[in-house]
Amino acid sequence: MKYDRTYNFSAGPAMMPEPVLEEIAAEMMNYRGSGMCVMEMSHRSKVFQQIRDEAEADLRNLMGIPDNYKVLFIQGGGTMQFAMVPMNLLKNGTACYIETGAWSKKAINEAKKFGKVEIIASSADRNFAYIPDCSDLPIPDDADYVYICENETINGTTYYELPDTKGKILVSDQSSMFLSRPCDVTKYGLIWAGVQKNVGPAGMAVVIIREDLLRDDLPSFVPTYMNYKIHADNDSLYNTPNCWAIYCCGKVFRYLIDNGGLSAMHERNVEKAAILYDYLDSSKFFTAAVDKKDRSLMNVPFVTPSKEQDADVVAASKEAGFDNLKGHKSVGGLRASIYNAMPKEGVIALVDFLKKYEAEHSA
């Protein structure tokens, strides 16, 4: 069955794979003979336990997650994790952050509430248009961890080489590039991702944490729900979890496995991004905002010669059947998010639209 769907370039909540949505729709009224929708069933039921267990098993399979890492499904998104990370990992009281854009800045500001924060590298000098050199960072001996936002959704940068943390724990916010390419989990102490960008519906984060980082000795001010160990000890079922998000994400995990895994997804994402970046680099009207070596495959910010023309492109794009090309309110401009679920045809259609617009509006 064909649906009247737009090419949705939103940074999140974002597109999900159509086969996944169709499968969810087919199970909406009666999940596998249970007589109810997943939104209605008890999180303590055997049916939901199987949904949760299959979701975790498939994610472990996709990413090659070692046995000494726990997979947690935690309500909330990035704002919750900005606080949970320092609450759980600060021991000596010092955390190192690399400042590469809007989301790492938010994480920095939140961490300052719980301890000393050292900004050990930054690209603020050029409006976060690049990833700074992280080969020899000034990491103090008492640092508890080094934190990065591995893909800045707003600013459109990504790491192609992880920082040298000099033996300190690496923590990564992978929200907008999660499951877009292969990942060696053993290089990290903790990975977290808000799922609403590249995996599923809003309202949940996936946390992958090495077991030795789970603690019984957290400060008394840390709320029970904010303790990673509580979630790990209870298989993410300490309280009623976001059952619907776990179910939908599990569908996406299985879809990715059935379609070649993360290596195949990475190849497709490289191909899609090249179509858009190649046009932007050849254009005399549109300009890509990020240095070539650090460009995200997921989030592509770009601009016209003026704010007024940026706004006109957004309006024209909606009339042409595209949606959510407006850049984030904090930076303006334009942005196309081309996550796993965005088909290559959508990127080609966008480039055709931009070419036509340029031809009609260039002097």
Image (spheres, rainbow, N blue to C red):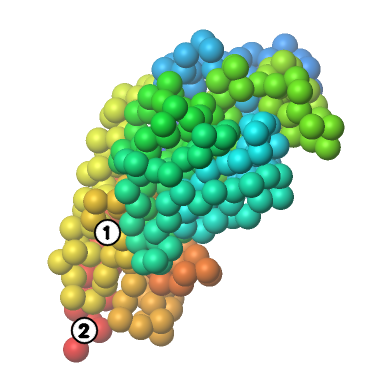
Quadrant containing the N terminus is top left
> Could you tell me which secondary element the residue under label 2 belongs to?
loop
Are discs 1 and 2 less than 8 Å apart at CB?
A: no
Foreground residue among 28 and 271? 271
Cα separation, mark 1 vs mark 2, equals: 24 Å
> Could you tell me which secondary element the residue under label 1 belongs to?
loop
Image coords of residue 114 (percent x, y)? 71, 44
Q: Residue at x 39, y 77 (%)?
A: 310
- Residue 80 versus residue 189 in the image, above or below: below
Residue type at the position of mark 2: Ser
Residue type at the position of mark 1: Asp
Q: Residue at x 32, y 48 (%)?
A: 133
- Residue 67 versus residue 167 in the image, above or below: above
Report if residue 354 is visible in the image.
Answer: yes
For residue 126, which quarter of the picture?
bottom left
- Residue 33 versus residue 268 in the image, above or below: above
Report if residue 350 is visible in the image.
Answer: no
Q: Which residue is mark 2?
A: 362
For residue 291, which numbered disc appears in the image? Answer: 1
Residue closest to the far front = 141
